[in-house]
Amino acid sequence: MSAGRICAVPSCSQPLRTAGTSPIPEGLCAACASRLRNNISSLRVLYRDCGSLLVRPRYGFLERTSTFRGGGISLNEAAVEVRGEILAVAASWAALVVDERRLAARPRREVPPLTEFLLAHVDWLSRHPAAADAYAEIARVVSKAETCATSSRNHIDLGPCSAADCEGIVRVTFHSRTTDVSCEHGHRPMPDEWLELAQRTKLAPAAGAQ
């Protein structure tokens, strides 16, 4: 089988799809085309999910983010960055579709209409000479957004629990909108105790902690 009949994704060696009885001359195999479609669909959801992580209200809990704003809000810079990348990538590939297909109307530069537009043209995009680039770039930003969403709900170990006969570790667990401080066995230290642990681990307590 000639190289022109193989999927354009470098890590894939599957044969290309067929359009009717004719093989598609270049682009993505059926599996990679399906993954491209799924990743485009994921962009909208991940953009929304990362949006819910943009700010954390300061309730006297520890903050993982380093930049602070007035009004009791801290900014999640990783979420800001990945949302910007999602928008830029979606807009870039939508512009290619508009320009090369000579379409009269452009979608608004917002993630929901951009992803809807790309999904409407995903079959064309998956047969484009740059299909492998679209596949790789969209997959990269999806992976980065998923990592951001996961890490923003992660935890940090502070130190040993002070409860009698407890050998558990006190940890701060970060959710999308809340922060929990407790040991693995459910003991919840007093604020002055976990703030002292935080200082030992070089974590900065939120302003206004009691």
Image (tube, rainbow, N blue to C red):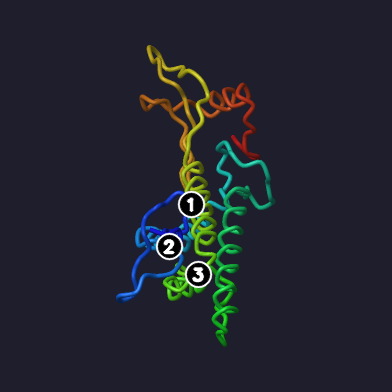
Image: 56 above or below 121: above
**Could you say which is closer to the camera, residue 113 or residue 121?**
121
- Rounded to the nearest angstrom, the CA distance separating label 2 from label 3 is 9 Å
Tell whether 85 sits left or right of 179.
Answer: right
**Secondary structure beneath disc 3?**
loop
Earlier-in-chain disc, 2 versus 3: 2
Question: Residue 6: x, y in percent?
Answer: 41, 59
**Secondary structure beneath disc 2?**
loop
Q: Which residue appears at 38% of the width and 63% of the height?
A: 16
Q: Which residue appears at 57% of the width and 39% of the height?
A: 60
Q: Which residue appears at 51% of the width and 51% of the height?
A: 145
Q: Label 1 belongs to which residue?
A: 10
Q: Amino acid at mark 3?
A: His
Q: Label 2 belongs to which residue?
A: 28
Contact? badges 1 and 2 (CB < 8 Å): no
**Could you say which is closer to the camera, residue 70 or residue 31?**
31
Q: Label 3 belongs to which residue?
A: 128
Q: Going by the picture, which residue comes out furthest to the left? A: 21
